[in-house]
């Protein structure tokens, strides 16, 4: 059986495929047009976020049995089409949990203490000590929208910092998630609006679906506190970006940090040139050595077991 790896995958994962007797083809630069011509030659494909397995591409996957997403999000896969074609879709939701939670926490510190702006001005030869009066995270209210693996990790870290953690979890696993959040000491909010009014820091942890698009929008961003900050390490479509730019420009919120965007690589000049308290990072939440190896080995193991049991 043949496996196509269309996005960068750590060698530890590739070795697992080879040890299980699969023929592995690596093509990290393959385009969707090329993929339409080649995908029919493979029994499995491993992707990350770059490759888009649209319905049009999957129409040509005449021999494909399994798609492996080395990571969490599945929004770059037409899962309905895959189901119609009886193609299994696997991912590794737990692999990046710690690294993404750590980045979200790091972004909170960076905004709260003006670390990014202080660094930039120091490199310009400035000494603006009095301008960068920040605040401690201890005692602050952190609101988590969504309560999957990453949010759970972040909640535990925030509680260890003596923050107050609140959760709105309608979009996750319902009663099970609510009970787990309560058990580790989180407050449960009945609506996003209530959370936004109360929290000093808001962090998003939702998948990108038609239901979650624009979770933060022009209407409810006005409910946030003037000093609040917004963190998004999940998916770009969760935020109405124009509304965020306006809120930052008009100082309706204290700041924001984005690791994900509606279009990647980021080309929105309004965001790039936004002079508000805004931190931008190029989708690096899962970019740690440990996470990359974990995602590669876990997806290789899952796919190998699936194909061998057919």
Image: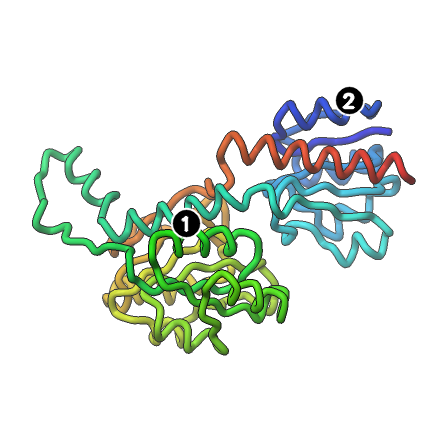
Can you say which quadrant of the picture contains the N terminus?
top right
Q: Name the residue: 44% across, 65% down.
A: 240
The spot of residue 237 in percent (x, y) is 51, 59
Looking at the image, residue 231 lies above or below residue 50: below
Under tag 1, what secondary structure? helix
Can you say which quadrant of the picture contains the C terminus?
top right
Q: Is residue 229 left or right of residue 54?
A: left
In front: 28, or 281? Answer: 281
Q: Earlier in the sequence, mark 2 or mark 1?
A: 2
Q: Residue furthest right?
A: 310
Under tag 2, what secondary structure? helix
The spot of residue 170 in percent (x, y) is 57, 71
Q: Name the residue: 65% across, 51% down.
A: 74
Q: Name the residue: 64% across, 39% down.
A: 70
At label 2, counting other C-alpha atoms closer than 10 Å, the crowd grade (few under 14, some 14-19, many 20 or more) is some
Q: Quadrant of residue 64?
A: top right
In front: 155, or 74? Answer: 155
Q: Quadrant of residue 201?
A: bottom left
Q: Is residue 139 left or right of residue 166?
A: left
Total marks shown come to: 2
Q: Quadrant of residue 282?
A: top left
Would you name the residue on which mark 2 appears? 18
Q: Is residue 39 left or right of residue 128?
A: right
At label 1, counting other C-alpha atoms closer than 10 Å, the crowd grade (few under 14, some 14-19, many 20 or more) is many
The spot of residue 177 in percent (x, y) is 59, 65
In front: 6, or 257? Answer: 257
Q: Which labelled disc corresponds to residue 104?
A: 1
């Amino acid at each position: 059986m043949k496996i196509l790896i269309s996005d960068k995958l750590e060698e530890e994962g590739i070795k697992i495929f080879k040890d299980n007797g699969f023929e592995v083809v690596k093509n990290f630069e393959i385009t969707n047009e090329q993929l339409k011509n080649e995908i029919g030659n493979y029994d499995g494909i491993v992707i990350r976020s770059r490759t888009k397995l649209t319905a049009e591409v999957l129409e040509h996957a005449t021999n494909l049995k399994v798609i492996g997403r080395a990571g969490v999000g599945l929004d770059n896969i037409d899962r309905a089409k895959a189901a119609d074609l009886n193609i299994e879709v696997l991912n590794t939701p737990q692999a990046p949990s710690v690294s993404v939670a750590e980045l979200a926490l790091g972004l909170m510190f960076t905004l709260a203490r003006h670390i990014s702006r202080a660094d930039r001005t120091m490199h310009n030869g400035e000494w603006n000590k009095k301008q960068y009066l920040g605040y401690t995270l201890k005692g602050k209210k952190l609101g988590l929208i969504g309560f999957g693996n990453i949010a759970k990790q972040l909640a535990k870290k925030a509680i260890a910092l003596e923050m107050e953690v609140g959760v709105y979890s309608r979009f996750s696993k319902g009663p099970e998630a609510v009970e787990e959040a309560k058990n580790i000491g989180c407050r449960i909010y009945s609506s996003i609006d209530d959370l936004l009014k109360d929290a000093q820091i808001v962090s998003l942890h939702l998948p990108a679906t038609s239901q979650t698009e624009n979770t933060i929008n022009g209407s409810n961003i006005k409910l946030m506190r003037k000093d609040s900050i917004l963190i998004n390490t999940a998916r770009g479509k969760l935020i109405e970006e124009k509304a965020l730019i306006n809120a930052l420009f008009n100082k309706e919120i204290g700041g924001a940090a984005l690791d994900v965007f509606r279009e990647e690589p980021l080309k929105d000049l309004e965001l790039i040139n936004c002079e508000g308290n805004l931190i931008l990072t190029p989708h690096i939440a899962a970019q740690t050595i440990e996470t990359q190896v974990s995602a590669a080995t876990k997806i290789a193991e899952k796919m190998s077991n699936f194909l061998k049991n057919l």
